[in-house]
């Protein structure tokens, strides 16, 4: 019998003040964490790395020792998240997160901590949305645009953050202004609202004056140029975007207009670049360019060309409009965040850079280049349209934005950080959340499987991220993007439920069990994507994966009953036996990646079998956990069969099959169901753990069982202390025999009496889906809210991980031809930059010498056309001079941006309509 007498060793003593285990205080100790200093009777320190708000990140403010993240308020449907969080938790999520970039420690501030509460309908409360941030005194105080409130934050000498907030109302207005932008100048703070610009005091936020803007009260962009000057864009109330650019000087009673080339140039974003003020603009035909704002010699300001639209277009196959930009003084680069192209919205705006000289000046000639090769998997992860772009003091870029879900709706990418390395950029999650698994990698790092929820929620206003990353010493998590070399499949942002490495790193084996994606496998020099939903017929909702002996791979998947209304019962049963489900087995040839000996283990065999062997005998086809054993066997944790369900945090109803969960022992073609001994039979086994030769299993409802592999029995050793509406999720055991269990409500540790007791953690925990003992007395727990680290008194916590940047692959991987001249291609995106995909009469397509841009994108601006063929792209017309015809924007009637042509902004019989890619004139 497994004995837990040594469990108390983890829970003895208290950390002292000098242990370094507390959260620290700002400014001396960084951002701090939600845990605070442990109570005198607490046996461990709890450190928090990560917080999840679901609301999108709208503002980032950096300093060398502190990063502030402002979030928009988001409403979370309780039904979507099932049993997540505490019962009394509000459905409104948002707030301000502080991050220590050196350690990864985080803290979330909400209305409970003094932020103004948002005026929301329905139950619960939440903090106001934060759309902009700026330092008043760097590292000591800041100002925030809180939509309905202007907020000032300041740290006390003890490191506590205190807030004051005011509402602003312009003379003649009857309701408070909506605040979206802020800039702290040396003598005052300039605030942008929907009622105009206003100057307030730096210390108490008292109004000094409202700044005249000549009928342009609706503010858009606002950036500081120097200690006394700000650059802004604004427009009339109700306009879909800015119409004018302005300069606001300290103490000035009115903003100074900037003379521009004409009304058809729409100002989009602004930035201070070295000593220059730069504005981006969009032209009617959808192209973009950059202006530099200069004095006109007579006390006014004028916009002159900085980078022409033709030059910017070199960064993309489509017109490039700069939606956000920032200056990186460390790497001497102007970073450009593109917009989704109006002319060709299927293309991405992405990120581009302009190399500058050490003084921040443009070189001659100017060269605009994409940040990365389009073949790089990173390019699939970054936003199509960049909405947030901030560069910190050491040259790291914080980036967030959107991509197209469809032609009517955009989805949120979440926040990433880009770090420059000698061998190219690295993509990093500064705050890892949604931790579903923690796996020890061959490179000495903890590999994290991240998934906040179903990624489809990104298209409905929630910041939902997924992917695989490696935890680093600074608490950030460097993204790993699978890069198959056997085909053109892409799994750049894989939703990996579990990660498995081979027992011997020299074998170079790695596999991902993914959620609603194909299975990624690497064996030796072969990296491939397997469509396991077809062979051997597994559910795309994979739950577990493990390497067996040799090159054998086990994959576990769920079962989702489909009721098929209107079909006869016998047909419903037959169909549900045929659907993907159960446990899969295969062997992979390391020389070519081919699979063999495919088997599927299920409760009831299908009458239609393809290229695999069908073996019944499981008590349920809902596989939840795997543990490989010696001799080619595997233990299989099973849950009861359920109906289909699309969400991670919601358990669907039980299927009418009434198939129970339990544990199965499988080897070869043999299946044995283990007998259970305890207060009730096993119901849903969700995790296994080892300590030496002993094997433990976690039942989601009952608690911990010891498994006797030889006797094929499971005996309960620790009862679950949680209630019926709480479920166990994860299990770990320390070398001393201490148990840790994660559940849908939090974290449990085993005490000296052998029973599991809840760990008190300040703030939400949500699902705790992964637990791992890092070292003696050090536990790492991952879940919805990121990572928790518990450190017992006297324990020495190791570094969270290696320092970055990390190699892109755990072992070197050849990508083969990879888009060079002569490589097979299916389109130009398969080829290296500057190459095209040329096809012969026999349809053999190969990457070839550079093509003319019009060969790549016929019908774009400047390309030859025939008037009768109507072969120009949208919003371009075929214009002829003598015999030469080319696609050009219409010169008279503006039909693209709704801001020119007529008083209403559109030609006759048309009206202005907004969309993801901008605003267009469409027929009435």
Image (cartoon, helix red, strand yellow):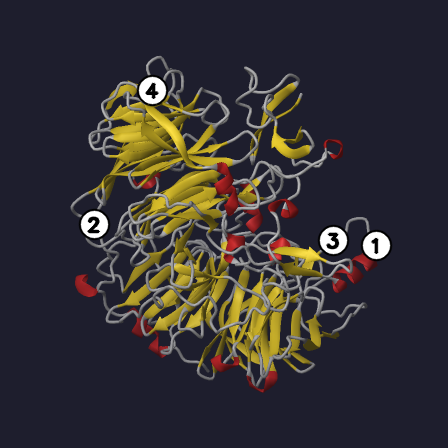
The one nearer the camera, 599 or 534, is 534
Question: In the visual, does 390 lie left or right of 492?
Answer: left
Q: Residue at 51% x, 56% y: name it.
A: 373
Residue 292 picture location, percent across and down: 37, 33
Determine the CA span between mark 1 and mark 2.
Answer: 69 Å
**Camera sees residue 414:** no
Q: Name the residue under label 3.
A: 563
Q: How many labels does the image show?
A: 4
Residue 676 picture location, percent across and down: 57, 75
Indicate which disc residue 27 carries. 2
Image height of 904 relative to 260, above or below: above
Q: Earlier in the sequence, mark 1 or mark 3?
A: 3
Question: In the visual, does 385 lie left or right of 219?
Answer: right
Determine the CA span between mark 3 and mark 4.
Answer: 57 Å
In the image as oriented, which residue stretches furthest toward the left?
A: 157
| Front label number (4 vs 1) | 4
Q: Mark 1 points at which residue?
A: 568
Image height of 239 relative to 771, above or below: above
Residue 147 picture location, percent across and down: 38, 31
| Front label number (1 vs 2) | 2
The one nearer the camera, 829 or 719, is 829
**Camera sees residue 914:** yes
Q: Name the residue under label 4.
A: 169
Determine the CA span between mark 2 and mark 4.
Answer: 34 Å
Determine the CA span between mark 4 and mark 1.
Answer: 66 Å
SS label for mark 4: loop
Q: Which of marks 2 and 3 is nearer the N terminus?
A: 2
Residue 578 picture location, percent across and down: 76, 64
Label 3 neighbour load within 10 Å: few <14, some 14-19, many 20+? some
């Amino acid at each position: 019998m497994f004995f837990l007498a040594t469990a108390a060793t983890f829970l003895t003593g208290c950390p002292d003040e000098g242990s370094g285990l507390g959260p620290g205080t700002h400014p001396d100790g960084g951002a701090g964490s939600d845990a605070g200093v442990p109570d005198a009777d607490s046996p461990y320190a709890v450190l928090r790395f990560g917080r999840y708000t679901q609301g999108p990140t709208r503002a980032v403010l950096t300093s060398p020792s502190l990063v502030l993240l402002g979030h928009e308020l988001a409403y979370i449907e309780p039904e979507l998240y099932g049993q997540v969080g505490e019962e009394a938790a509000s459905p409104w999520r948002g707030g301000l997160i502080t991050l220590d970039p050196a350690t990864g420690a985080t803290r979330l501030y909400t209305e409970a901590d003094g932020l103004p509460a948002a005026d929301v309908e329905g139950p619960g409360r939440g903090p106001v949305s934060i759309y902009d941030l700026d330092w008043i005194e760097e590292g000591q105080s800041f100002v925030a645009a809180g939509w309905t409130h202007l907020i000032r934050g300041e740290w006390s000498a003890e490191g506590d953050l205190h807030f004051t907030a005011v509402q602003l109302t312009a003379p003649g207005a009857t309701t408070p202004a909506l605040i979206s932008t802020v800039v702290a100048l040396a003598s005052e703070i300039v605030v942008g609202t929907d009622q105009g610009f206003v100057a307030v005091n730096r210390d108490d936020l008292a109004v000094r004056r409202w700044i005249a803007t000549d009928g342009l009260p609706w503010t858009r962009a606002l950036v500081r140029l120097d200690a006394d000057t700000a650059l802004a864009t604004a427009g009339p109330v109700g306009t879909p975007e800015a119409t004018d650019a302005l300069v606001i000087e300290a103490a000035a009673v009115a903003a100074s207009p900037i003379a521009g080339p004409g009304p058809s140039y729409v100002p989009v974003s602004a930035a201070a670049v070295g000593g220059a003020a730069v504005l981006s603009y969009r032209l009617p035909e959808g192209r973009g360019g950059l202006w530099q704002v200069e004095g006109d010699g007579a006390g006014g300001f004028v916009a002159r060309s900085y980078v022409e639209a033709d030059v910017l277009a070199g960064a993309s196959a489509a017109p490039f409009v700069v939606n956000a930009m920032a200056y990186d003084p460390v790497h001497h680069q102007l970073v450009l965040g593109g917009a989704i192209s109006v002319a060709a919205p299927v293309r991405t705006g992405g990120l581009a850079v302009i190399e500058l000289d050490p003084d921040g000046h443009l070189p001659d000639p100017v060269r605009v280049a994409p940040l990365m090769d389009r073949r790089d998997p990173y390019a699939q992860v970054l936003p199509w349209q960049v909405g947030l772009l901030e560069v910190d003091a050491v040259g790291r870029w914080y980036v967030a934005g959107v991509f197209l879900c469809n032609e009517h709706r955009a989805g949120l990418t979440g926040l990433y950080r880009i770090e420059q390395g000698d061998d190219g950029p690295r993509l990093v999650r500064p705050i890892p959340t949604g931790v579903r698994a923690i796996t020890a990698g061959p490179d000495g790092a903890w590999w994290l499987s991240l998934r906040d929820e179903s990624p489809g929620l990104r298209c409905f206003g929630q910041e939902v991220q997924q992917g695989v990353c490696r935890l680093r010493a600074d608490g950030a998590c460097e993204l790993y993007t699978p890069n198959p070399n056997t085909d053109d499949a892409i799994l750049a942002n894989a939703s990996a439920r579990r990660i498995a490495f081979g027992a011997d790193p020299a074998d170079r084996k790695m596999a991902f069990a993914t959620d609603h994606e194909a299975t990624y496998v690497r064996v030796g020099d072969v990296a491939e994507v397997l469509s396991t939903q077809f062979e051997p017929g597994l559910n795309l909702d994979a739950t577990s994966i493990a390497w067996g002996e040799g090159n054998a791979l086990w994959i576990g998947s769920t079962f989702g009953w489909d009721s098929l209304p209107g079909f006869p019962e016998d047909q419903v049963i037959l169909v549900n036996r045929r659907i993907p489900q159960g446990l899969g087995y295969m062997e992979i040839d390391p020389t070519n990646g081919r699979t063999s000996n495919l088997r599927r283990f299920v409760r009831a065999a299908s009458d239609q079998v393809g290229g695999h062997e069908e073996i019944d005998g499981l008590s349920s086809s809902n596989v939840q956990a795997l543990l490989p054993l010696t001799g080619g066997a595997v233990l299989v944790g099973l849950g009861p069969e359920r109906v289909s369900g699309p969400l991670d945090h919601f358990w669907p109803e039980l299927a009418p099959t009434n198939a129970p969960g339990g544990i199965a022992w499988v080897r070869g073609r043999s299946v044995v169901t283990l007998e259970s001994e305890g207060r009730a039979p096993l119901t849903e086994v969700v995790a296994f753990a080892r300590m030496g030769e002993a094997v433990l299993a976690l039942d989601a409802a009952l608690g911990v069982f010891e498994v006797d592999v030889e006797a094929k029995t499971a005996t309960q050793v620790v009862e679950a202390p949680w209630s019926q509406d709480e479920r166990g999720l994860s299990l770990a055991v320390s070398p001393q025999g201490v148990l840790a269990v994660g559940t849908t409500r939090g974290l449990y540790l085993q005490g000296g009496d052998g029973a599991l007791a809840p760990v008190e953690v300040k703030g939400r925990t949500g699902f705790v889906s992964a637990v791992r003992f890092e070292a003696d007395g050090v536990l790492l727990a991952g879940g919805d809210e990121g990572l928790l680290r518990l450190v017992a008194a006297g324990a020495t916590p190791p570094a969270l991980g290696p320092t970055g940047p990390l190699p892109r692959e755990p072992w070197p991987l050849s990508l083969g031809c990879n888009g060079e001249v002569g490589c097979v291609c299916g389109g130009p995106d398969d080829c290296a930059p500057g190459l095209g995909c040329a096809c012969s009469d026999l349809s053999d397509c190969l990457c070839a010498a550079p093509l003319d841009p019009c060969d790549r994108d016929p019908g774009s601006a400047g390309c030859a056309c025939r008037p009768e063929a109507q072969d120009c792209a949208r919003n371009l017309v075929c214009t002829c001079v003598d015999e030469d015809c080319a696609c050009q924007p219409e010169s008279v009637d503006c039909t693209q941006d709704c801001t020119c042509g007529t008083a209403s902004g559109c030609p006759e019989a048309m009206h202005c309509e907004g969309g993801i890619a901008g605003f267009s004139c469409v027929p009435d």
